[in-house]
Image (tube, rainbow, N blue to C red):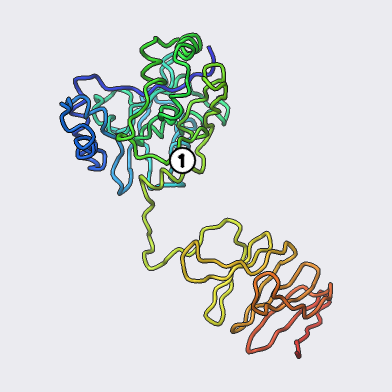
Amino acid sequence: METPVCAIKMLPKELWIEAASTAAGVNPANAPALQALRAFAPDADIEPEHLALLTSKYWGSGGVRLTVGFLDNPAADLRARLLSHMNAWAAYCNVQFVETATDPQVRIARTANDGYWSYLGTDILHIAAGQPTMNLDNFTMNMPESEFHRVVRHETGHTLGFPHEHMREDIVNRINRAKAIQYFQSTQGWSEQEVVAQVLTPLPNSALIATAQADPDSIMCYGLPASIMNDNVPVNGGTDIDAQDAQFASTVYPMLNPFPNWLELDDNPATADIIASGGNLYQRHDSGRIWVYTGTPHTGWLELDDNPATVQIVADGNALYQRHNSGRIWVYTGTPHTGWLQLDGNAASVDIVAAGGHLYQRHDSGRIWVYTG
């Protein structure tokens, strides 16, 4: 058998309607858009069970705080490692998983030969106490780190309510039904019914809080080989939380701002330095790019230069200066990129400062100079 893949656990059919009601109670946005359904099919008799299947299972937008327990009491190092990978989602969205031995909401088993699976989001509230809501088949400390990323973060995504990305219609429509059934029967031991449920049934758009297009590299996406695809193009599948996963999770569970008196102006990991003077705010990237803020958070930055030699910027009033790693010193004259006037070119220059209408430089020999114009 090939590498095990995940199966989303479905509640018994007799619990579907009750679970849908729970989901809508926890997060009203989970409820299907009935007005849109009525407009599309005004004379349709929509069965409650069908509405239940159209109900999402996300937790509230105010964030997720779930307790976690381990049913077979694994060693402390494994518990901590699993929990740390569950909380990897917390880097991108307002979620937290905390271990407890008392009535945990998320209950993890490691039942051998039972595969990797999880119930979806708020459905875990309908699993009897003491019964697992997630299974990590035979997981031990000897598992490669890559499997902790691929499996634990994936199953945690289901607990957060995220469905399988490969069940988006634009991916399902590419799959050869007969070949897929044969493939998953031989590699996973699934029945035809299981393959249809886990791979070949597209999720209705009305049941999705979704990105515009399917993400074949999502942590929530299976890898599908070219041999079962109608276009012979494989779906690589995700091995870790990718940028689109992170963006989506932050939309469903937005981070809370603990400092409401601060407005974020930019979020670029390349930023190495910022300076402010004369009512202007500048930033320098580690690539040497220099920007001035023009008034709109994130998008309102005007690039003034793009030189990898730039290692320092200083400002005084409306005057902006830069120093290169070669010691060359420049002043900005008002035209982005081309509007820089060289003031000096001494390789001994290692620092510049500006204040009170004056520009100073320090050499590596300790000599200090003032620019006289």
Q: Give the structural element (helix, strand or loop) at label 1.
A: helix
Q: Is residue 258 above or below residue 89?
A: below
Q: Which residue is mark 1?
A: 245
Query: Would you identify the image quadrant in which residue 350 lies?
Result: bottom right
Q: Is residue 333 above or below residue 259?
A: below
Where is residue 158? Give x, y as percent: 38, 32
Quarter holding the C terminus is bottom right
> Which is nearer the eye, 272 or 143?
272
**For residue 282, which quarter of the picture?**
bottom right
Instruction: Give the left or right position of residue 230, taking residue 100 as reference.
Output: right
Establish if 100 lies above or below 270. Answer: above
**In screen coordinates, is 305 left or right of 364?**
left
Disc 1 marks which amino acid?
Answer: Asp
Q: Classify 10 Å Cα crowding around label 1: few (below 14), some (14-19), many (20 and above).
A: many
x and y percent of residue 17 in the render?
18, 27
Closer-to-camera residue (41/337): 41
**Where in the figure is residue 18, as x and y percent of width and height?**
18, 28
Q: Nearer the viewer, residue 310 or 68?
A: 310
Q: Residue at x 63, y 89 (%)?
A: 356
Q: Residue at x 75, y 64 (%)?
A: 309
